[in-house]
Amino acid sequence: MIGLTIAGILIAIIIGAALFINLSPQFGENPTKEQKIEFGKTTHYKDGKFVNTTTTVMDIHIWPTIKKMLNPQAKRKPKVDIPVEKIDSLEIENHNPTITQLTWFGHSAFLLEIDGKKILLDPMFGESPSPVPLLAAKRYSKELPIAIEKLPFIDAVIFSHDHYDHLDYETIQKLKNKVGQFYTPLGVGNHLISWGVPKENVHQLNWWDKVMLDQIELVCTPARHFSGRGITDRNTTLWSSWVIKGANENIYFSGDGGYGAHFKEIGDQYGPFDISLMECGQYNKDWHAIHMMPEETAQAAVDLQSKLFMPIHWGAFTLAFHDWTDPADRVTKAAEKLNQPITTPKIGEPIIIGGAHYPTVRWWENY
């Protein structure tokens, strides 16, 4: 009887998990058969999967990883909740269109105000980067710089890939009726459409594709990463970085990825950049091919011909085994050695692109 009971419980768990994966909207929508045919015409889509231009392998050592998970280090998250600088909807609404400004929301999420447009980059505003929030790491800050409900109309949202810490179902539900256009790499837009975003407002781009948002040029550029939201959809959608070229300012957004020759290629073709927003966090030597080490982040900023860069993909969630302050500590040292200008604003603290001064206070040392 005990054996039958255990077997029944296991079967119920398996059935429940299968139903959740197949019925929960969190997982989004896979590319269609017609899209896959079009994807096959690209040079980086093979056997139904997107691939990196550089050989990219994750060499995860299972038992050391499990030991780290079972014995978490004390410094993997802040001792207390991180406070944020608050911004007001009227400030955003009445922003001077001649001033280009970036506001960090933690991790890789930004509000970019440029040439009179309001653009969100990877707006993951949820509490946890997971389809099951109760089981996932919680955000370090109790609040965002501004609640989603208080945001004014947003002209565009740009996504780098479909992982949960960059593309959040609940965030899209709150944003979709106050956004003009959505820009994604190939296949990622299907998730948005399945969540109720009008198809005509979703633009899916391949690497090196260009599109205009009025006078702002958006270029979908390569990255070295991977994709997927479920068990069976790994690498079925594309990942990317982005070039955002306004009338006077040129901005690079790295998304996620490992170090590679693509940074110099992008820098040679579209640099120099007034600021590069560079992934720096959630790394490990086992998966360095898909997440740069901080020293590589600083070098990538040099490769891109960055006048200034900012480390991102940290300050909000614990998704790796390093101390939560390690990205900022290491990348600031590396930038100094390379004589590469860097800025480290607090969450919610604005960066004026082209301004005389940039935030460089080591605020993370207080938490």
Image: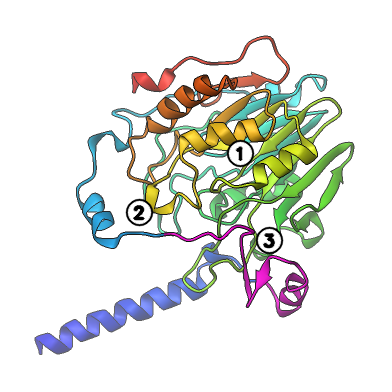
- Mark 3 and mark 1: Cα distance apart in space: 18 Å
Inspect the image, locate mark 3, and give the three-letter code of the amino acid beneath it: Gly
User: Residue 20: x, y in percent?
Assistant: 44, 72
Question: Which quadrant: the C terminus?
Answer: top left
Tag 1 or tag 3, which sits nearer the N-term? 1
Please check the rendered image and state whether residue 46 is part of the magenta-colored stretch, yes or no: yes
What is the crowding at mark 2: few (fewer than 14 residues within 10 Å), some, or many (at least 20)? few
Secondary structure beneath disc 3?
Answer: loop
Secondary structure of the residue carrying tag 2 is: helix
Q: Quadrant of residue 348?
A: top right
Residue nearest the viewer, comparing 218 with 154: 218
Region rendered in magenta? 31-58
For residue 333, above or below residue 258: above
SS category of the residue bearing label 1:
helix
Question: Is residue 155 shown in magenta?
Answer: no
Q: Which residue is mark 2?
A: 134
Residue at the spot 43% in from the left edge and 48% down from the top edge: 128
The majority secondary structure of the magenta stretch comes to loop
Q: In the rendered image of this protein, does residue 49 appear above or below residue 126?
A: below
User: Quarter of the image containing the N terminus?
Assistant: bottom left
* Res. 196 mark: 3
Residue with the mark numbered 1: 149
